[in-house]
Amino acid sequence: MKRILLLLFLTLAASLALAQKFDIEAFSDSTKYGWENYLDRADYREELSRKQALLQLYELEINSLKRGVLKSMVAPGWGQFDNKQSIKGSIFLASEIAMVGASLYFFDRSNYYYQRYLNATQVEEIESNYNAAVAPRQYSLIFAGVGALIWAYNIFDVIQSTEEYNARVWQRIEAKDRESRVRMDGIGIEIEF
Amino acid sequence: MKNRIYLLLLVLAGLLSSCGLSRDNPLDPNSNPTIIVPEIISSLEVYPSPPQAANKFVELRWRANPTYSTDGYYVYRGLGYFATFTIVDTVFTNNASHGSKPWHRVVAGEYYYKISAFKEYPDGRLEGRACQPVWVKVPI
């Protein structure tokens, strides 16, 4: 019991010794944001509200990362299509279909010979059918492995391409906003003359 | 996210490596050390029935295999050395007479005969390799 009390006392003493004082002057310093006067503050607020409006547009136009990953997990290339990268999406989709198709074809061939191996009663047939089943099974696994790699890379790629796409969306919205004299936001329409 | 992808790849690699072909045939001597493969028979001799014989036949004789590896023999017949051979008789001694049983059909012509030994196991009959085909001409 004494040990626990001593430990509590030491902890309290250490926390008091290490505690920082709340600096009310630093907290209330209005120049810390770079505002020298009321006009600076007003400009800053205007800029902030403009960016908030742009952010609303941005959020409407961006692609969700989670949704993109999910789509590409279901059908490789789907997420890339959403990111306006149809060539890349087509390549992913076609190569995945080719790999899965080749894998299934060789798996079927392997199964055909493997069934013959299981039913064989003659020693030469046992050996030849087993050997005939092994090679297609290996090809099937290789194609499945390559397909899995393409599938994984497609997910990795959709993460990157979605981030790039979203960055481009932000750049486009900002550029459009700079060029535009008419601004639309959640509050209303602003026209510059 | 990257860690998850690596984990996924590891799981896939594990799944793929566990998909090897297993030797599940109970008669496969490579998977079951108790299985003895019957030897190839040797010294096959083939004699046709004499000319003008009413019931034509082909007599076959060969050297018997050891009993621990062989329980019987299949007699094959084909129309050529590399042709498809068909089992025409199953015997349990080291000789056969093709034409002696009611379902045998032997007519004059040229044939190739070969023999393979088999061994009975609880899961079935394991047949060994057949010997080289031997030519015979059954006269008219």
Image: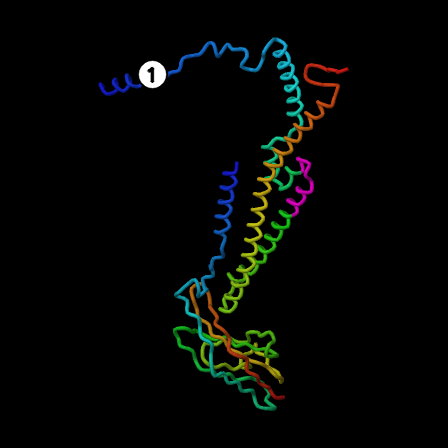
Viewer-proximal residue among A6 and A78? A6
Name the side, left or right, on which B44 lies relative to A73.
left
Badge 1: chain ID: A
Q: Residue furthest front?
A: A36
Q: Main secondary structure of the magenta part?
A: helix
As displayed, is residue B55 above or below residue A190?
Answer: below
Q: Residue at x 51, y 65 (%)?
A: A120
Which of these two is toward me, B64 or B32? B32
Residue drawn where x is 60% and y is 74% of the image: B84
Q: What segment carries the magenta color?
A: A81-94
How crowded is the residue under tag 1: few (<14 C-alpha within 10 Å), some, or many (20+)? Answer: few
Q: Is residue A4 magenta?
A: no
Task: Please determine whether, in this image, residue A145 is positioned above or below residue B110.
Answer: above
Position of residue A137 measured from the top left corner of the image (x, y, whole percent)? 54, 56
Helix, strand or loop at disc 1? Answer: helix
Q: Nearer the viewer, residue B61 or A36?
A: A36
Q: Position of residue A95 (x, y in %)?
A: 64, 48
Looking at the rendered image, the quarter that the N terminus of chain A falls into is top left
> Which residue ends up furthest to the left in the rendered image?
A2
Tell me: A51 left or right of B72: right
Q: What residue occupies the far right of the structure in this picture? A: A193
Q: Which quadrant would the C terminus of chain A be assigned to in this image? A: top right
Instruction: Read off the residue under disc 1.
Output: A17
Q: Amino acid at mark 1?
A: Ala
- Quarter assignment of residue B76: bottom right
Q: Residue at x 55, y 82 (%)?
A: B134
| Image position, residue A8 (x, y; %) | 29, 18
Q: Nearer the viewer, residue B55 or A19?
A: A19
- The percent position of residue A87, horizontal first and vertical second, equals 69, 42
